[in-house]
Image (cartoon, helix red, strand yellow):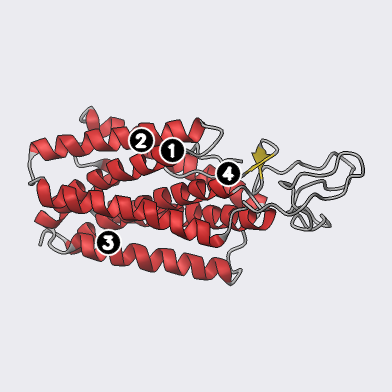
Amino acid sequence: MRSSNPVFSRRGFSRDNGYAGFNAQQPQAGGPAVGNPYAQGAANPYATNPYAPTDTQFGAPAPVRTNAMTMDDVVSRTAITLGTVTVGAVLAWTLLPVSATSYGLAIGAALVAFVLAIVQSFKRTPSPALIIGYAAFEGIFLGVISEMYNSVWSGAPFQAVLGTMAVSGATLFMYKQRWIRVTARYARIGMTIAIAFIVVLAVNLLLVVFGVADDGGLRSFGPLGAIVGILAILIGCFFLTLDFKQIEDGVAYGAPREESWLAAFGLTMSLVWIYLEMLRLVAIFSGDD
């Protein structure tokens, strides 16, 4: 299963061209669970390192890899991508005044970021250039949008940042405490809800574009919009839990170090998703002030 963010196509940490987190080999009917860490009675999936080469003659494990992904790698790559988003946002906020032109630039930057994310999602290996490029253009989009919100609802972006930090921190805490357990069933149900949510929003967008729902429909700035916004934030938290699980699995399995860029890529998309929804939610609860 592909853990996904807005593009629904970011692949997980590779394991023999599969996914370490949610696409482990399923047990055959009537047979033992093979490679499925969520099946009852399954062996510890971390007991061996599937990335480590083995001696083809004797089947003995080869020396431990020296380029395996670590949590420090994930933290440093994530700091780079989020730092790039922040720099892009600050520059856009500072240099681009609120206008129709800057709004058009924001839409263009968002489209470029989306294309770069799609390209990276279909690549077999992570590309730091694509990921940093995505972060830069996403930052430009966020900077312009944040400035526009701030011009109407003063302080909304700052509150949204605090809200994003609080929500993501709480999600990480609950994950670390194992109050949230990312199982295959959890992932399937969550992805089904997330995909249905995206489809509904896409239909709503079409209705707005064609004037059927001129008040924004589900994305209005009223009570219904607030409910949809809260649901969207919860879905963003679901994406974060998948990211946390993939990172945990990647470190435990000894995934290649370059896979830490995918971890940073996924976390960045999840946090951007939550921030944008938080920004709308703050605006809704702020009223017309």
Q: Position of residue 186 (x, y in %)?
A: 61, 53
Residue at the disc numbered 4: 12
* Mark 3 or 2, closer to the camera: 2
Sequence-wise first label, 4 or 3:
4
Q: Secondary structure at mark 1?
A: loop
Q: Residues within 10 Å of mark 1 (few under 14, many from 20)?
A: few
Q: CA distance from mark 4 to mark 3?
A: 28 Å
Residue at the disc numbered 3: 160
Q: Residue at x 23, y 54 (%)?
A: 222
Q: Residues within 10 Å of mark 4 (few under 14, many from 20)?
A: many
Residue at the disc numbered 2: 114
Sequence-wise first label, 4 or 1:
1
Q: Amino acid at mark 1?
A: Val
Q: Amino acid at mark 4?
A: Gly
Compared with 276, 99 (above or below) is: above
Residue at the disc numbered 1: 7
